[in-house]
Amino acid sequence: MQTITCGTGRSYDIIVGRDIIDKSGELIRKVSQAKRAVIISDTNVAPIYADRVAGSLYSAGFEPARACFKAGEKSKNLNIISEFYSIFSDAGITRDDIIIALGGGVTGDMAGFAAATWLRGVDFVQIPTSLLAQVDSSVGGKTGVDLPVGKNLVGAFWQPSLVICDIDTLKTLPEKYFTDGMAEIIKYGCILSKSLFEKLENFEINSILEDVISECISLKVDVVEKDERESDRRRLLNFGHTIGHAIEKLQKYEGLTHGQAVAVGMAYITKAGEIAGVTAPDTYARLVNLLQQYSLPIEVKGITNKQLCTAAMNDKKCTGNSINLVLLKEIGCAFIERMGFAEFEGFIGL
Ligand SMILES: NC(=O)c1ccc[n+]([C@@H]2O[C@H](COP(=O)([O-])OP(=O)(O)OC[C@H]3O[C@@H](n4cnc5c(N)ncnc54)[C@H](O)[C@@H]3O)[C@@H](O)[C@H]2O)c1
Ligand SMILES: [Zn+2]
């Protein structure tokens, strides 16, 4: 078991280990005097883990209630948040009580947002059960929901009191979601850690999983500590995401998964960087090898570069007439280049 402390504002611990979900009650008790708790989970995760978490909370003196929603991104909306508020109200959740997110990134984003807004903010704990949630979404304090007009448009920065990362929960995670999380792990290697990238190249993932997850969490903690609100350093985490988001949007979120789209985004931008001479030679070949080693795509069919550029330039993160691109100098070292739209089109090869 390892503990990583995230020192943003009010600092909190991220505990990484195996088979620790049954200890969640006692771990949460150390950070909370709450009487009541609500476990928020989805229809895939709740049947596997909610009883164990509820039992552990009960043993630690909490009165656990539950809220369960239909698994999937489509549930990440304000109607479901409103249902959570009703459950909080019925359970008598006060400002001294606690909300527990048990599940993937969808659960964490929604439970965090509900906690941030109920009674103007109650404590919450993340128990991430998907690889993506463990290495990415459960740390950093971004919470929120989607609107019909776009993803993650409504939200709040709200830090958890504790994150309990039980690696053993990944045993029940379907393969395709594991692969999705691998794209984010490869991203961390690309932008921040050559040694992580090399580890992924040279070892079978299951033999290094706990270390790799802890390392990714530490890397993200380091970035968000230095830069709690979105600005330059945190923007590095968007590597592969400008084009990735554009692909997801053009395919109406029914084509490549997020991780697959990010993989293609990382490959495209690195190839363009190499052609432009700003990325070290051979970076693209190594990246492509690693992505393929983890069954991630490196290109997308049926979308032109022109469409990609237009979609990327319409992104909500795009301000004025320019775009912030995250590029690699070499493996393990990224930088941000602000480009005008015309320059961006040229860069990407129009
Ligand atoms: N807040 C942030 O900083 C941040 C960062 C990245 C992504 N996100 C958000 O995260 C979401 C994606 O996260 P995700 O991929 O975890 O999605 P998800 O929560 O939908 O989980 C993926 C699938 O795996 C299932 N699942 C999760 N853990 C399981 C387990 N242990 N066993 C069996 N099934 C399990 C879920 O029920 C779901 O079907 C998106 O909404 C995205 O916007 C947020
Ligand atoms: Zn991502």
Image (cartoon, helix red, strand yellow):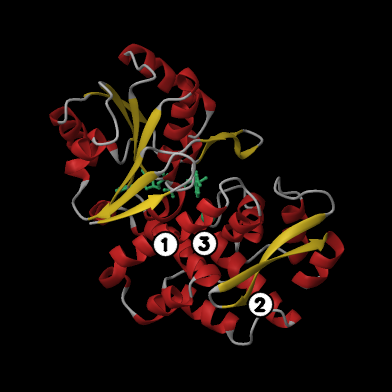
The amino acid type of the residue labelled 3 equals Gln
Q: Secondary structure at mark 3?
A: helix
Q: Position of residue 206 (x, y in %)?
A: 28, 69
Task: Residue under label 2, please give it.
Answer: 271
**Marks 2 and 1, how far apart at CA:** 24 Å
Q: Position of residue 6 (x, y in %)?
A: 42, 49
Position above or below: 199 against 40:
below
Residues at discs 3 and 1 in contact (Cβ within 8 Å): no
Task: Residue under label 1, please give it.
Answer: 216
* Quadrant in the picture for residue 307: bottom right
Mark 2 nearby-residue class (10 Å; few <14, some 14–19, many ≥20)? many
Position above or below: 280 against 130:
below
Q: Is residue 343 left or right of residue 198?
A: right
Q: Is residue 20 left or right of residue 176?
A: left
Mark 1 sits near ligand 2, with its Cβ under 8 Å away: no
Q: Secondary structure at mark 2?
A: helix
The amino acid type of the residue labelled 1 equals Cys
* Quadrant in the picture for residue 282: bottom right
Q: Quarter holding the N terminus?
A: bottom left
Q: Nearer the viewer, mark 2 or mark 3?
A: 2
- Looking at this rendering, what residue extends furthest in the left direction? 59
Residue at figure coordinates x 62%, y 52% from the top left: 251
Work out whether residue 315 or residue 299 is closer to the camera in this orientation and state it: 315
**Mark 2 or mark 1, earlier in chain:** 1
